[in-house]
Amino acid sequence: MAIAESSFVTHLEGAIDGAELEPNVIQTLHEGRPIWVRYDLDAIRESVSRDDLLGRPSNLWRYMELLPIYDQSKIVSFGEGLSPLLKSPRLGATLGATDLWVKDESQLPTGSFKSRGMAMAVSMANHFAIKSVALPTAGNAGGAAAAYAARAGMDCYVFMPADTPVINQYEAIAYGAHAYRVNGLINDCGRIVNEGKQVMGGFDLSTLKEPYRIEGKKTMGLELAEQFGWELPDAIFYPTGGGTGLIGMWKAFQELSELGWLDSDKMPRMFSVQSDGCSPIVKAFEEEEKHAEPFANAQSMASGIRVPAAVGDFMILEAVRQSQGAAVSVEEARIGEWMRLGMSQEGISICPETGACIGAVEKCLADGTVNTDDRIVIFNTGAAQKYAEALHCEIPSVDKDVPIDWSTL
């Protein structure tokens, strides 16, 4: 299918070797690794200014020139984007930070940042007339894919570890997906998807196994820049499983810099956050490796970061190192504690993955990796209510027929 004249996409590019690939055909991986979408930034600069965004709709599609959409009639959308950027002074004071913010992705249509990537990936699948999609998931991606596929009229196949949070399991089914539990981890589910697509012909929406989820996720970075008046923060803490969001944001910042839209040359330090129950990126970062070895016996209550092997490992590590950031692991046993801390102090619906980020901020402030007066942004990637298991606690009762001793409550 020919590219519409309104598209600024010039080509696709193999992330592993820079090979130039055709943009107007279905692409998945190149040499077994992810693919970038590249744009004519000079033409974009001449066509649109950042001030032109002001009158546009309050969703991610306001950045149309920096997205790979060729035909707007093929967009599959629920109005996603422009999630709130919330100043968090009480949490900051507890952690020791004077300028702490939370970018709250829990308010997106499917309750997590996965809305962004799936809006773009399913829109492009719709553009290429794909009728069936499949993916592995350990959490929110399955429900998001199922929702967008339903809106597009596509079949959706979802394979998830048997211990995936139960709400994620239920929502995939409720959105009409063919959902299956697997007695393994997300990489086992990915193998099943890969085997199945050879037989059934479904398009693989796995993380970074098509070029477009990155482009949807990069809108987090575009929004952050716009919300801060085109000046980026000092540090970004991002929970990392497959890493698409971190990779996408770093790409967004590079593109904004080349466009001349940023008011400062300062780039944020990117902090990739994992649990010590599953920390392949942290291990590779500390050992100065380009690629991460699969993590054995991966465990975490934060299902989104329980990814033993990421196909874009080298892209995550490159972004972290280029930004002079770090990969940080936190104690698995304390994730629930940090999750509840964020919720109780700021009233934000914090997911376990973000609980890990709160712990990482605490750790990095304590050891001096970040300064107390740095502008720090934590990405809250999902809604707490989607993690019933993580929220479980005992609630005391009162007897309606017995006078209440208010001094004991």
Image (cartoon, helix red, strand yellow):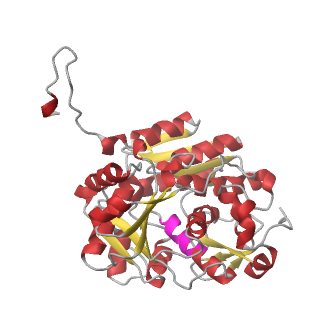
Horizontal side of 75 relative to 313 (left or right) equals: right
**Image coords of residue 58 (percent x, y):** 66, 55
Image quadrant assignment for residue 223: bottom right
Residue 199's place in the image compared with 281, above or below, is above
Residue 254's place in the image compared with 196, above or below, is below
Residue 134's place in the image compared with 407, above or below, is below
**Image coords of residue 228 (percent x, y):** 55, 69
- At horizontal 58% and vertical 37% (from top left) the residue drawn is 175
Quarter of the figure with the N terminus: bottom right
**Image coords of residue 211 (percent x, y):** 63, 66
**Image coords of residue 31 (percent x, y):** 59, 74
Residue at the front extreme of this rendering: 407
Horizontal side of 334 relative to 264 (left or right) equals: left
- At horizontal 20% and vertical 24% (from top left) the residue drawn is 398
Q: Main secondary structure of the magenta part?
A: helix
Quarter of the figure with the C terminus: top left
Q: Nearer the viewer, residue 221 or 293?
A: 221
Residue 17 among those drawn in magenta: no
- At horizontal 27% and vertical 70% (from top left) the residue drawn is 363
Q: Nearer the viewer, residue 347 or 111?
A: 347
Residue 272 seen in this snapshot: yes
Residue 276 seen in this snapshot: no
Image quadrant assignment for residue 83: bottom right
Image quadrant assignment for residue 93: bottom left
- At horizontal 47% and vertical 36% (from top left) the residue drawn is 170
What segment carries the magenta color? 243-252
Residue 245 among those drawn in magenta: yes
Number of marks: 0
Horizontal side of 126 relative to 157 (left or right) equals: right
